[in-house]
Amino acid sequence: MPGGKVHTAITLATTTGLVVYPVVVTYGNPYWYIAGAMAGVFLTPDHDVDGGNFTDTIIRKVSYVGQKVWRVFWTPYALLLPHRGKLSHFPILSTFIRLGYILLAINLIVWIIGLVSKILGGDNTVSFVFWWNWSFFSGLVHVDTLHWVADQLIKGKEQFIDE
Ligand SMILES: [Zn+2]
């Protein structure tokens, strides 16, 4: 199983490489497509690992507190989905589920902030947060699929696990 460093390298190589080019010139917005592929570094299928993943290592280098917040955000997802299962790793399906989780989690956080604000006597004008972009989604599906392929091809080589 390739580790986080290998997956991140594949993601970045894809994003910056020629593989993206024929896709972006024929479909969608190329900038959102590249943004989606780049986001794949942090929105990795490996958020299903209970103890965290390579993104924690990256964020910890910038902010210790930020990494803790990041881990709390992804903990329910990690506990709900089995590692390398179809729901977290299978192409297209897993990308929908991961982005759906983010939207749900953000709306839950916004709702809690609104509730606390209301209790404290403040304004409670929170509304449902929603954002979707098919080009962004396609870029993320692209790198998620490569992640899945890499996991399938390098199955069992546990020495590649680095984080
Ligand atoms: Zn994986």
Image (cartoon, grey):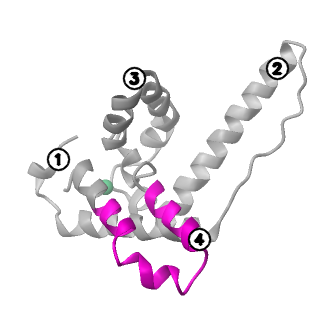
Rendered residue at 27%/57% (across/down):
9
Main SS class of the magenta portion in the image? helix
- Give the amino acid type for the residue marked by disc 2 in the picture: Ser
Q: Is residue 90 visible?
A: no
In the figure, residue 142 lies in which quadrant?
bottom left
**How far apart, in angstroms, are the residues tagged by discs 1 and 3?**
23 Å
Which stretch did the figure color magenta? 10-39
Q: For this view, does 112 lie left or right of residue 13?
A: right
Query: Which mark is in front, 4 or 1?
Result: 4
- Which mark is drawn over residue 161? 1
- How far across and how far down the image is residue 19, in percent? 36, 78
**How far apart, in angstroms, are the residues tagged by discs 4 and 3?**
32 Å
* SS class, disc 3: helix
48 inside magenta stretch: no
Q: For this view, does 158 lie left or right of residue 20?
A: left
Q: For this view, does 15 lie left or right of residue 160?
A: right
In the figure, residue 71 lies in which quadrant?
top left
Q: Which residue is mark 4?
A: 135
- Give the amino acid type for the residue marked by disc 4 in the picture: Ser
**How far apart, in angstroms, are the residues tagged by discs 4 and 1?**
31 Å
Q: Which residue is mark 2?
A: 117
- Give the amino acid type for the residue marked by disc 3 in the picture: Tyr
Q: Which residue is mark 3?
A: 64
Whether tag 1 and tag 2 are in contact, CB under 8 A, the answer is no
Rendered residue at 39%/30% (across/down):
62
